[in-house]
Image (cartoon, helix red, strand yellow):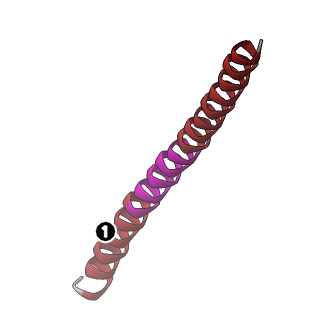
């Protein structure tokens, strides 16, 4: 009977560890997904800024060297 309780307790402990690992993996997945989303937003913002800089340089070139 004592061995059965030990096995049951070991299974309960093991299940708890698996649950913590799954929770950690879920948290990591959420963090990584958020990071990719932020990276995409920053990259898009940088491209927009570069495009606006090119437009400003062209307009200034047209205005001053006309």
Q: Residues within 10 Å of mark 1 (few under 14, many from 20)?
A: few
Rendered view: 57 above or below 52: below
Residue 18 falls left or right of residue 59: right
Name the dominant secondary structure of the magenta segment.
helix
Determine the image quadrant of residue 65.
Answer: bottom left
> x, y (%) of residue 21?
58, 35
Nearer to me, 20 or 38: 20
Residue in view at x 45 percent, y 49 percent: 40
Relative to 34, is 51 on the left or the right? left
Which residue: 65% across, 25% down? Answer: 10
For label 1, the SS is: helix
Q: Which quadrant holds residue 3? A: top right
* The one of 12 and 21 positioned closer to us in this rendering: 12
Point out the stretch of residues depicted in magenta: 31-46
36 versus 65 height, above or below: above
Q: Nearer the viewer, residue 19 or 35?
A: 19
Picture coordinates of residue 50 (x, y %)?
34, 66
Mark 1 = which residue? 54
The answer to whether 66 appears left or right of 5 in the picture is: left
Q: Residue at point 54% right, 43% down?
A: 28
Tell me the quadrant of the picture where the N terminus can be found. Answer: top right
Residue 56: x, y in percent? Answer: 37, 75
Q: Residue 43: within the magenta?
A: yes
Q: Is residue 23 above or below residue 2?
A: below
State the quadrant of the C terminus.
bottom left
* Residue 60 covered by magenta stretch: no
Among the 4 quarters of the image, the one containing residue 63: bottom left
- Number of marks present in the image shown: 1
Residue at the location (68% across, 30% down)? Answer: 13
């Amino acid at each position: 009977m004592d061995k059965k309780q030990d096995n049951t307790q070991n299974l309960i402990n093991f299940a708890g560890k698996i649950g913590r690992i799954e929770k950690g993996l879920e948290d990591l997945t959420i963090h990584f997904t958020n990071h990719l989303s932020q990276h995409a937003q920053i990259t898009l913002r940088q491209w927009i800024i570069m495009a606006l800089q090119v437009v400003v340089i062209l307009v200034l070139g047209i205005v001053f060297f006309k």
